[in-house]
Amino acid sequence: MLMQEFLMGVDKELAESRNKAELRHKGSRTTTLKTLMGEIAVSRNLYRKIKDDGSVEHIYLLDEALGLDTIGFISPNLVEKILEHSCEMSYREVSQAVSDFTNQTISHQGVWNIVQAVGEKQIEAESRLVKAYKNNELSGSKKIPMLFEEADGLWLSMQGKSRKQFSKWCIKIEMVLSYLWPPTALNTEI
């Protein structure tokens, strides 16, 4: 109830301080946000904005002020928890865990939809970075002569001749993946 009142107060302040010539009030819409605290019913004011090219856009100032980039009507904190759990358990188990700790329901298909939506956003963000790199538009200020990156290693069980010597226990060797950039850095002194 306190969060609902707070959000409605913020929306009222935004309505009073908006540029009334640019943003026309088109009424309010009630929606329910799913959060870690439970479900919050919020009445948000909708505004019509005419862009420079003449097209019409409808926006919620409350969403922009709070930075709500929700997937459906699920808060970013709840999405983060769902993603953390989905790395460790099945979607059905995640939906049950969310129901247990937030006292609201989400189906296993809803969990899958959230994972897919976040994956698509990640792909879009990475493609923008690749495009910026190709256009030489990255905004870094530090140049380094050599970059060495080490990824997590992979443990391999050894077989064959070396295993026969140690038959009581299994021999494992770590294979470390690494990458050196630029490739010509191999010829430079360190």
Image (spheres, rainbow, N blue to C red):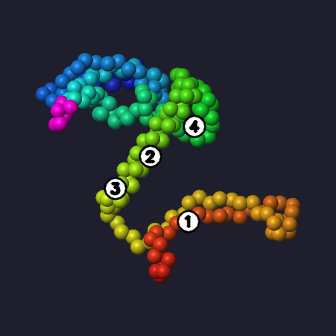
Cα gap from disc 1 to disc 3, whole angstroms? 25 Å
The local secondary structure at tag 4 comes to: helix
Q: Residue at x 23, y 20 (%)?
A: 26
Whether residue 26 can be seen here = yes
- Mark 3 vs mark 4, foreground winner is 3
- The residue under label 2 is 123
Q: Residue at x 48, y 24 (%)?
A: 38
Q: Residues within 10 Å of mark 4 (few under 14, many from 20)?
A: some
Closer to the camera in the image, 98 or 121? 121
- The residue under label 4 is 85
Looking at the image, tell me whether mark 2 or mark 4 is earlier in sequence order.
Answer: 4
x and y percentages locating residue 165 in the rendered image: 85, 68
Where, by quadrant of the figure, is residue 174 drawn? bottom right
- The residue under label 1 is 178
Disc 2 + disc 1, Cβ < 8 Å: no
Query: Which segment is the magenta one?
Result: 50-55
- Mark 2 vs mark 1, foreground winner is 2
Cα gap from disc 3 to disc 2, whole angstroms? 14 Å
- The residue under label 3 is 132
The local secondary structure at tag 2 comes to: helix
x and y percentages locating residue 31 in the rendered image: 38, 20
Q: Give the side of residue 109 with respect to residue 171, left or right.
A: left
Residue 101, compared with residue 162, is above or below; it is: above
Where, by quadrant of the figure, is residue 65 drawn? top left
